[in-house]
Amino acid sequence: LIARLHYAAAAAYFRQKHYDTGRMLKNAGLIKEFPPLMPLSVSLRVIHRRDVLAGAGAAAALALLTGGAKRAAAEDVAPRTQAFKDAYAALVRDATPTRELISLDLPEYAENGNGVSFMLAVESPMTESDHVKALHLLSTANPQPVVATYRFTPACGRAQVTGRMRLASTQDVIAVAELSDGRFVIGERTVSVSIGGCDT
Amino acid sequence: LPEHVKAGDLIEVKTLVTHVMETGNRRDAQGRLVPRKIIHTFTAKFSGQEIFSAKLGSGIAANPYIAFFMRVPGPGEFELTWIDDTGETAVERVPLVLG
């Protein structure tokens, strides 16, 4: 059983590395196509500890070679549209949202922008005097920036919502919550999109 | 809905509806814009009281999945409503049985 677990962990590790490496190579301009062919299964009969270590070493060396990959990835992010800026300004008006309490659970890489699962949560006791009134989900680069607005009541008990969104391109996804005391809080997450959701 | 629910429990209500969620940005083979058809409103009431609602836009994927939470006040009935741009309305009533 332990050997099987090791096998599964190593396979998952190599698959993820392959994916990250492909992205780095594309960002560095070394390959045109991404994602490259991904192995769906890795067949290894015996995994020796030294092999796993060697694999990790090679991956680390490659990461060093393409050291600019993180920065390159940041440049892939689509600029924020005027429509987004207008929608955001209309939402928060003269308030200054603070970066706290919100968590956005979204994938770092989305293969298909037509359906990207998300889970948004705001830390709140959800009492009459202290609760989340609304949670707005915004896209910074879709044609329409306001993806959804969720309205909660203290009866919810927890300010959390799950759904699936469209993402036209690699971009930042923003969640803004309105609290019962009038404050706004904000959270954001960058999602890399391989195939954009068509004309979302 | 989860099973074996007691009053006071925090439960997750998971909803799924079949709908195209046509964005209005897409063109057909002849180059004409396909008119927007979006479920713009979802409302969840429990025993007549509004618990949770959502305004959805074209950035929500087809066949909208919405999951939210509720602190169970006691037995009752959910009334879930979806309304789209054409005025089509779907109402689903689901009793919540305790025990």
Image (spheres, rainbow, N blue to C red):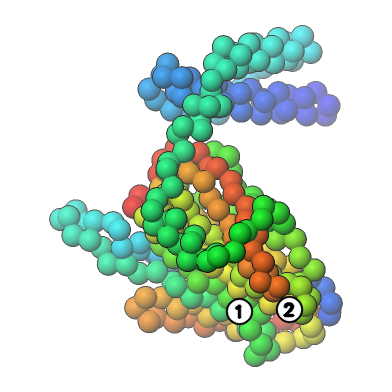
Q: Secondary structure at mark 2?
A: helix
Question: Which residue sits at x=35%, y=69%?
Answer: B37
At label 1, the amino acid type is Ala
Q: Is residue A87 above or below residue A41?
A: below
Name the one closer to the observer, A91 or B87.
A91
Other residues around mark 2 within 10 Å, as few (<14) / some (14–19) / many (≥20): many
Q: Nearer the viewer, mark 1 or mark 2?
A: 2
Horizontally, residue A89 falls left or right of residue A98, namely left
Subunit bearing disc 1: B
- Where does the N terminus of chain B fall, quadrant-wise? bottom right
Q: CA distance from mark 1 to mark 2?
A: 11 Å
Question: Which residue sits at x=74%, y=67%?
Answer: A158
Q: Is residue B26 above or below residue B69?
A: above
Name the one closer to the observer, A101 or B24.
A101
Question: Which residue sits at x=15%, y=55%?
Answer: B30
Pointer 2 residue: A155
Residue A92's spot in the image, x, y percent?
55, 64
Residue A163 visible at all: no
Q: Secondary structure at mark 1?
A: strand
Horizontally, residue A143 falls left or right of residue A38, namely left
Residue A83's spot in the image, x, y percent?
39, 57
Residue A100's spot in the image, x, y percent?
71, 54
Q: Is residue A113 above or below residue B85?
A: above
Answer with the quarter of the image where residue B36 lies.
bottom left
Question: Which residue sits at x=45%, y=78%?
Answer: B83
Pointer 1 residue: B44
At label 2, the amino acid type is Ala
Name the one closer to the observer, B84 or B25.
B25
Determine the residue located farthest toward the bottom in the rendered image: B48
Residue A116's spot in the image, x, y percent?
52, 50
Name the one closer to the observer, A96 or B65.
A96
